[in-house]
Image (spheres, helix red, strand yellow):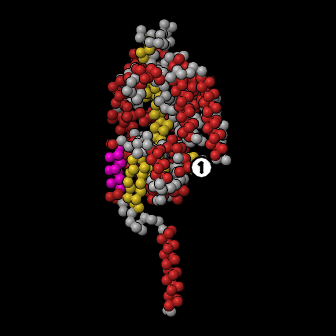
Amino acid sequence: MDRKRLYQVFALFMACLMLFTACAPKTGVNGPVDITIFVGFGAGSDPDSMAALNTIAEEYNASHTDIQIEFMFSTWEEHTSKFTTLLAGNLAPDLAFPIGIQGIAEFYDEWIDVGPYIQSDNYDTSAFYGPSLQLLKFNNKTIGLPLGVYPSVTFFNEDLFDSANVPYPTQQYDPTWTLQRMVEAAQHLTLDENGNDAANLNFDPTKIVQWGWGGWCGPFRTVPGKFGGNPLGMSDDFKTANMNTDGYLEGMQFLYDSIYTWHIRPSSVDEGSTFTGMDFTFESGKVAMFECFSWASYAFPNFTTAGNWNVATVAAGPNFSAVSPVNADTFAIPAHSQHPDQAWEVAKWLMEPPMQSRLCSIFGCIPSRKTLAGSWVDSMKSEYPNVDFQVFIDSIYWMDASPNNESWVPNYSKVWDATENAMSRILSGESNDVQQVMNDLQAQVQGYLDEYWAAHP
């Protein structure tokens, strides 16, 4: 072969080699691919969780040669700034895990659609509870697979109910267990210092020593859906605020009446003076019932100290439709990840049934995989044998999946804070004019929407 011909063959060979190197996956080319998993959008940054996750990383790395994983931890307070800094420095992690709906909304444009991975792998999503899958679909984009959920239930103190001779709330979903019936029960469970309940004409609302209801533990956006409204508080195209109607006004009025008209719920002033040092007023033994997410499980030992407790379904709203507000944990792959294919492989491994069960135990969530529900109930009942944990599982089918109370809206953080500040005005007694509070909120949120769309024509 002459020198010219040899040169042409060599050039062609080098071109093919360069093309192959550019297109081939990075796994196995220069050693294993390192996948960084960012923990901070959800539970997992406490010392025990960090140790448990690092053990999982060691197990994965010992059994895989092509991919190695490492967890990167952040506190909840610093997760936004830390993740933003990583993106800006071209140091994006490959997975955010665990991450909830709020975390997804905070960086809505950053997450890739894993739908193509699910399709190409023919991944069996029927193994998960259907509503938990709906939570992860945003404008035809699927963010991740459902690791676990935190549905809401009604926690109640059996001792206080027994003492007042009031029937327990229902533990099976029943449209006749309504907010109105809950209020009626709570009035008989609210007592002044002389033992008069809130339904008694001699009741003194300035001397309350026991409350029948502790309210909803979540953000105000969990409330409008109970009154038939959209939890997001705006039109479907996200351009018109509906904060002074559409469930928001009704929900805020209910909150006001529960404190100042029916006297069944402590105000935020009462909470600060009577329930100091408690995450939930229910821990005091002076509150008969309240509604909260299952992530309250970290406080179950304190609930037990306060008395015999149990759980019931959430109360149905005026339209006789029960809505169990839910939080959820999933994973998300950043668009700036250098290794999305390998990140998907790691995510699938983390979602395998044994690992999913283990992770949900670490994070305190209920596994979204249907086959794991029974073992979760059994595990919880081994610690709290008198509590009907099946209520949590049943509540999955009543959760606010689409839209969820944490779903994305334009100018997300500003709208969220404005809504919470409006609720604070009512809880604290700063204002007794609910309509005016909601009109103010309407104008503020509409301004945030207009600001967003002016920047995103």
- Residue at 56 percent across and 40 percent down: it is 412
Q: How far across and how far down the image is residue 292, in percent?
A: 46, 31
Q: How far across and how far down the image is residue 243, in percent?
A: 62, 31
User: In the rendered view, would you say 400 is above or below 285?
Assistant: below
Residue nearest the observer in this picture, 382 or 248: 248
Is residue 211 in view from this perspective? Answer: yes
Is residue 374 in view from this perspective? Answer: no
User: In the rendered view, would you say 198 is above or below 62?
Assistant: above
Instruction: Classify mark 1: helix, strand or loop.
Output: loop
Q: Report the magenta stretch's main SS.
A: helix
- Please indicate whether residue 71 sits to the left or right of residue 130 in the image: left
Residue nearest the observer in this picture, 253 or 133: 253
Q: Residue furthest bottom?
A: 2
Residue 111 is covered by the magenta coloring: no
- Residue at 48 percent across and 38 percent down: it is 327
Q: How far across and how far down the image is residue 379, in percent?
A: 35, 38
Disc 1 designates what residue? 140
- Residue at 51 percent across and 81 percent down: it is 11
Q: What amino acid type is highlighted by mark number 1?
A: Asn
Please count the marks in the image: 1
Magenta stretch in the rendered image: 49-60
Residue 58 is covered by the magenta coloring: yes
User: In the rendered view, would you say 116 is above or below 98?
Assistant: below
Residue nearest the observer in this picture, 287 or 310: 287
Residue nearest the observer in this picture, 346 or 77: 77
- Residue at 54 percent across and 30 percent down: it is 421
Mark 1: few/some/many CA within 10 Å (<14, 14-19, 20+): few
